[in-house]
Image (cartoon, rainbow, N blue to C red):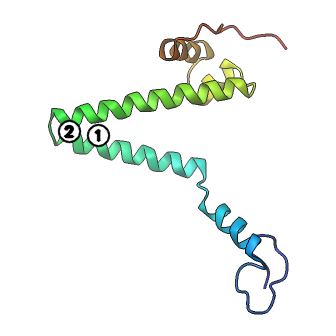
Amino acid sequence: MTCAACGGPLPKGRRRFCSDLCRVRGRRQERRYDTDEFTAMITRMIRNLGRRVGRSDTAAFGALWQVRDTADEACATAIDGLRRAGFSWTEIGAAAGQSGQGIGQWHRRRSGTNESFQEVAP
């Protein structure tokens, strides 16, 4: 038997982790969500919320609209982080199925920044 965190041998009396440090590290790693799975789960939840609101009233629609605004803010924050990490508008747009210029314009409207949408030559 080997440790689930480090792959080292397990001491006698241990079932999954060889030490307390490996136990903490291993459990922390197990708690992490895969981004793709997490995104798919959120997408399903929002679609189901739309169906529920459609069978409800206008007060519930206001809450759904707030979710939409929050998602827009999250996208703008993600774009800021991707730009700081060195990704181009074209790369970000391609990931969203949009043009780089379109994503740049969307971001500018949402965040109020004046960053140029032109690709900068390396």
Badge 1 vs badge 2, beta-carbon distance below 8 Å: yes
Residue most extreme to the front = 20
Residue 47 percent coordinates (x, y): 35, 42
Q: In which quarter of the image is the N terminus?
A: bottom right
- The residue located at (32%, 47%) in the rendering is 48
Residue 56 percent coordinates (x, y): 16, 41
87 and 78: which one is in front? Answer: 78
Question: Residue 93 appears in which quarter of the rendering?
Answer: top right
Judged from the image, the secondary structure of the residue bearing numbered disc 2 is helix
Residue 8 percent coordinates (x, y): 85, 77
30 and 99: which one is in front? Answer: 30
Above or below for 69 versus 49: above
Q: Rate crowding at label 1 as few (under 14), some (14 to 19) or many (20 or more) other CA atoms within 10 Å.
A: some
- The residue located at (39%, 27%) in the rendering is 69
Residue most extreme to the bottom = 12
45 and 25: which one is in front? Answer: 25
Question: Residue 94 appears in which quarter of the rendering?
Answer: top right
The residue at which mark 2 appears reads as: 54
Q: On residue 50, which mark appears?
A: 1
Q: Rate crowding at label 2 as few (under 14), some (14 to 19) or many (20 or more) other CA atoms within 10 Å.
A: few
- The residue located at (29%, 40%) in the rendering is 50
91 relative position to 101: left or right: right
Disc 1 marks which amino acid? Gly
Judged from the image, the secondary structure of the residue bearing numbered disc 1 is helix
- The residue located at (46%, 27%) in the rendering is 72
Q: Quadrant of the C terminus?
A: top right
Above or below for 26 versus 79: below
Question: Residue 26 appears in which quarter of the rendering?
Answer: bottom right
